[in-house]
Amino acid sequence: MELDVAIIGAGAAGIAAARRLRDRGRRVLLIEAMRRVGGRAHTTMVEGMPLDLGCGWLHSAERNPLARFAEAEEVAIDRSDAAWGKQLHNLGFSAAEQHEAWAAFEMFERSLGENPPANDCAGDAIARGHPWRGFLDMLSGALNGAELDLVSARDFLAYDGHASQTNWRLPGGMGNLIADAAAGLPLSLATSVTAVDHGGATVRIGTERGTIEAQAVIVAVPTDILARGDITFTPAVDEHLHAAARLPLGRVDKLFLAFADAEAIPAEAHLLGKPRSALTGSYYMRPFGRPVIECFFGGIAARAMADAGDAGRTAFAIEELGVLLGGDFARGLRPELRDERRDLHPLIDGGVVHEVVDGPVRRDGRVGHRLGRLGRGNVDADEPRRAARLGDFRGDTRPLRLVHVGYDDARPLGREPFGVGLADALPRAGDDRDSLIQASHGRQENTDACR
Ligand SMILES: Cc1cc2nc3c(=O)[nH]c(=O)nc-3n(C[C@H](O)[C@H](O)[C@H](O)COP(=O)(O)OP(=O)(O)OC[C@H]3O[C@@H](n4cnc5c(N)ncnc54)[C@H](O)[C@@H]3O)c2cc1C
């Protein structure tokens, strides 16, 4: 089949781009390295329960396009308030302490906005010895997958400062929603792309299973994959790869624990293991009333859990829960429902993208800067035109026929995720290639790499 567009990566971003293009009559192929679609969106069925091992929350749901999509698909949505931010029976975290901790967070965000650190390091906005520093690093771990010292102050604000408090879930699984969205799309699974040659009349995509040719390519793999050079680009797109390196994936990780006595603890409750430490877990008790605890680790805690391995992190979670809920309860926890994210490694290892603190790439004022600001927190209310500027990037020597899309960038923005602009802009098959180039190029503000 002659292809208009090959899309590398069948995560949320790649699937959405493929749907959009297909709906406009383009001939597309999704090329995915794993044996399944969905990427970091992945629901697995365990004892009849759809458990999300990857993303599970529709953040800023009132303007989250995935929420609109779920509604259109008539998928059940749980709109009840999230239990985060509360501590079940104030265990190990008194009401006064919770008040102090959240006040510290508000103070921190205010300080980021009013008196941003000159070096752009979010960690410099609050004293390292502050009594709630560990709590704030834990929050940053959950939001960015990295503690404050590793995160750009501007990016932190651009993301969290624009997020709403409306967070919804899908009882049937976010991973299932994304995977179902791929139904009917032309797909090549278990096909790892190793090279993209976009210098000739067509784009040639080298895979372990042979070469695929298309008029254009959309690269929808995580920034880390680009940065570490898994895919070779000819001609080189070093500035893009450099920019991707400045927008790494932070790490978040999940583990599910099951317990026999479903009534032992209230449903939809939350516990933070050690409120003053970043090296702790966030435990969501009985989501949807199910007899499980969803254990979530971010940043330094997620990295520690990765090092600890399955047994180590299960023991860690059980120990933290035991301190709060008592040894008897903890002894009844079964680690059978452990995270199966091994399946995700190494192609989508990591979690959520965050912008690193200011560095040479940015100071150069080169694409790393622009791409950086077009990351997760891009195009915020203060900088509505900033996105358009990405269109300036031509690699200086040639137009682009290669676009990188990611889902994360759409997350806080309420923008339609991934690939929208490109799909609208791409001419139909048979149109001349220059217009294809110009069209895709001119619309990158909606699609390019972004993060
Ligand atoms: C544990 C966890 C919890 C999260 N929770 C939330 C949440 O609650 N809410 C939220 O909004 N977000 C959450 N996220 C983030 C969210 O999952 C991601 O932002 C989103 O799924 C990214 O989609 P994507 O399409 O950009 O990338 P991915 O989902 O990473 O898709 C990229 C795809 O590219 C494929 N690929 C990589 N290299 C190659 C190659 N060489 N050749 C071919 N294919 C390749 C990968 O296999 C993968 O399928 C969470 C992430 C994790 C890990």
Image (cartoon, rainbow, N blue to C red):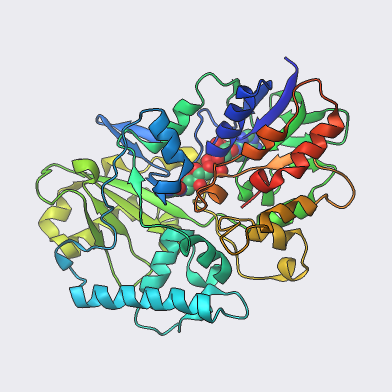
Is residue 322 shown above or below 408?
Answer: below
Of the pair 52 and 308, the residue shown nearer to us: 52
Q: Is residue 344 visible?
A: yes
Q: Position of residue 175 (x, y in %)?
A: 42, 35
Q: Position of residue 375 (x, y in %)?
A: 61, 56
Q: Is residue 42 visible?
A: no
For image coordinates 81% across by 36% down, the residue present is: 437
364 left or right of 52? Answer: right
Of the pair 360 and 168, the residue shown nearer to us: 168
107 left or right of 78? Answer: right
Look at the image and tell me in which quarter the N terminus lies: top right
Q: Position of residue 234 (x, y in %)?
A: 83, 40
Is residue 201 shown above or below 405?
Answer: above
Q: Position of residue 43 (x, y in %)?
A: 38, 35
Is residue 290 shown above or below 330?
Answer: above
In this view, the residue farthest toward the top is 1
Question: Residue 403: which quarter of the image?
Answer: top right
Disc tally is 0
For image coordinates 19% across by 70% down, the residue present is: 92
For image coordinates 59% across by 62% down, the residue present is: 355
Is residue 7 shown above or below 168?
Answer: above
For image coordinates 85% across by 29% down, the residue present is: 433
Question: Residue 31: which quarter of the image?
Answer: top right
Question: Residue 316: which quarter of the image?
Answer: bottom left
Of the pair 81 and 332, the residue shown nearer to us: 81
